[in-house]
Image: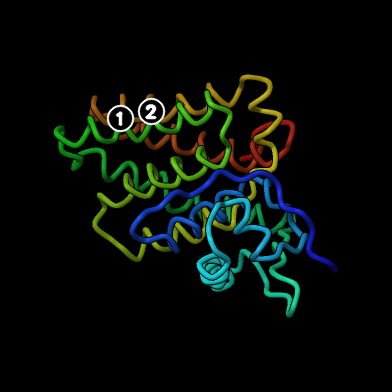
Amino acid sequence: MSPVPVPDLPGVGRRENLRDRIRDALRAAIISGKLEPGVVYSAPALAAQLGVSPTPVREAMLDLVKGGLVVPQPNKGFRVTELSEQDLDDVAAVRLLIEPPTVRDVVAVIPAEDLPELRRMAQAIVDAVECGDLVAYIEADHVFHLTLLGYRGNRYLVDVVADLRSKTRLLGLTPLLRSGRLIRSAAEHHELLDLVEARDADGAELLMRRHIGHVRGLWAGGAEERP
């Protein structure tokens, strides 16, 4: 299988930890389906799209190899891994076991003074949708949810959820964006913070269950939410 031209990807800019920025951008592109499952992409082609040199791209892709998102193809590049429907069901099932009860637990411990920053993170998700930038949307969503779970004080739990989220595929995002339904979903992050601010642990847990249902159902390309 030969490497193929890559889709337009946003530049990652010049930041202190360029490798991490590239890894996050590529991970988001894979999850959103911008980098397609089963397709081989070369590091030089990806680097050209991102506006960086090939070396940090190769390093970032090797990080993604460890996470199972891509597989190296000697002398060609990296192939994006494919997940079966059963794989996606299993990922969603484990997330449902972990994330809703964890959100319930953190509602009581999130300091009121942290809410403005969490609101900023939630708004970054909305802003990305309004700009039609799915890669930025995935990145902002990733940061928001892991930050929220981090209040549980268990870094192993956060690492597990980060890995599970990386294995998710949201191939239905583009039609949702075009239909305007993704902006309503993005607004759920502010709704979740409303529940946190009201210290409504039951409501926050229920909203997280619905949110993950979106991921496995509508967002993954299905016709409706899945349990």
Q: Quadrant of the C terminus?
A: top right
Coordinates of residue 125 in the picture (x, y in percent)? 45, 33
43 with respect to 23 (left or right): right
Looking at this view, is 205 or 33 the one in front?
33
Outermost residue to the right = 1
**Which of the 4 image quadrants contains residue 162?**
bottom left
Numbered disc 1: secondary structure: helix
> Which quadrant of the figure has residue 114?
top left
Q: Is residue 72 left or right of residue 140?
A: right
Given residues 125 and 170, the one toward you in this image is: 125
Residue at point 69%, 68% (across, down): 78
Residue 172 occupies quadrant? top right
Residue highlighted by disc 1? 119
Q: Residue at x 41, y 44 (%)?
A: 100
Mark 1 surroundings within 10 Å by alpha-carbon count, few (fewer than 14), some (14 through 19), many (20 or more): some
Q: Are marks 1 and 2 in contact (CB under 8 Å)?
A: yes
Measuring from the top left, give residue 26's x and y in whole percent: 57, 55
Q: Residue at x 54, y 23 (%)?
A: 183
